Image: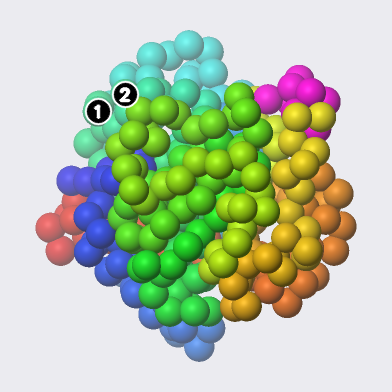
Amino acid sequence: MRHFLTLMDLTSEELNQVLQRAIELKAMQHRHEVYEPFKNQVLGMIFEKSSTRTRVSFEAGMTQFGGAAIFLSPRDTQLGRGEPIEDSARVLSRMVDIIMIRTFDHADIELFAKHSTVPVINALTDDYHPCQLLADMQTFIEHRGSIKGKTVTWIGDGNNMCQSYMNAAVQFDFHLNIAVPPGFEPDADLLAKCGDHVSLMTSPEEAATQSHLIVTDVWASMGQEEEQAERLRQFKHYQVTEALLDKAADDVLFMHCLPAHRGEEISMTLMDDPRAVVWDEAENRLHAQKALMEFLLNKAQNK
Ligand code: CP
Ligand code: NVA
């Protein structure tokens, strides 16, 4: 039985296998092929933070597989009233076949997974957002082929998305330039573990030079709402614009996990630029997570 709490929980080969399968499942879905390998199986979805894409993609994906999904919010469950995470994990995993969790503290999802008898998927914590990386890598492969050996640039906050890109640099073997304002660096231990795969800088222009993929994210993540004004001030030189993309390779792509704040981390018009592939990226959440669920359910059920 396997969990997916970070990209490091699968081998590079397994990740590539999941992405190839995501591309196949996408083609099947676009042909309106009915494929229901998980009839009567249930996905439990625990959301302690807001979501549009993650909720809809997981729920739609499980429905397309012939199964069902249950949305659980702390407002209505005993988890929100202090029932221990360990007990919730033991109980829920006796009732459902697979569980995804969006929460704050990464240690909480590790604790849940430790006590769960079914696969647990990280649907975003304060530290990582690995499902988004599956979608991003699928999108790059579909547009440009293998990402191995390419240069990828992260601009903005050293947040959960940035740290997932750091894991991706190791697992998919690309080079990641990270440009963050001083004081907003990703975790130092993680940085050390990434070795030559990651370079930390402060200049967005330097980080973008000759890059094949430029990525950014909101400046204030969920849970940092009260820091919004101060962050706007600290990040103002880190906006991704068309002019910044012009410094990159001719075939550069732009991605953003969304939701985006036009006029803050990106220019007002960047998402309309032909180099931006954000809508494909958003769609691929569905296909990549279907491939992930298939992989984890098959492993758990020895198929
Ligand atoms: N990118 C992403 O995870 O979006 P949601 O917050 O809408 O799920
Ligand atoms: N870094 C953002 C990603 C949202 C999908 C957040 O955690 O809010």
Q: Which residue is rendered at x = 86% and y = 49% of the image? A: 263
Q: Which residue is rendered at x = 29% and y = 46% of the image? A: 8
- Residue 220 lies in the magenta-colored region: no
Find residue 65 and report its horizontal and vertical position in percent: 41, 67
Amino acid type at circle 2 is Leu
Residue nearer the viewer, 211 or 259: 211
Q: Is the magenta stretch mostly helix, strand or loop?
A: helix
Q: Which residue is rendered at x = 34% and y = 34% of the image? A: 192
Q: Distance between the residues labelled 1 and 2?
A: 5 Å
Q: Which residue is rendered at x = 43% and y = 14% of the image? A: 83
Query: Around disc 2, counting alpha carbons within 10 Å, would you say few (fewer than 14), some (14 to 19), or many (20 or more)?
Result: few
Outermost residue on the left side: it is 302
Q: Residue 114 carries which label?
A: 1
**Is the Cβ of the residue at disc 1 closer than 8 Å to that at disc 2?**
yes
Magenta stretch, residue numbers? 224-232
Q: Is mark 2 on a helix, strand or loop?
A: helix
Please determine whether, in this image, residue 300 is positioned above or below residue 229: below
Asked whether the viewer can see residue 140, the reply is yes
Task: Choose top left, top right, bottom left or bottom right for residue 253.
Answer: bottom right
Left or right of 255 on screen, residue 83: left
Find residue 82 and report its horizontal and vertical position in percent: 48, 11
Q: Which mark is residue 152?
A: none
Amino acid type at circle 1 is Lys
Q: Which mark is residue 111?
A: 2
- Residue 229 lies in the magenta-colored region: yes
Asked whether the viewer can see residue 43, the reply is no
Check the picture and name the quadrant holding the C terminus.
Answer: bottom left
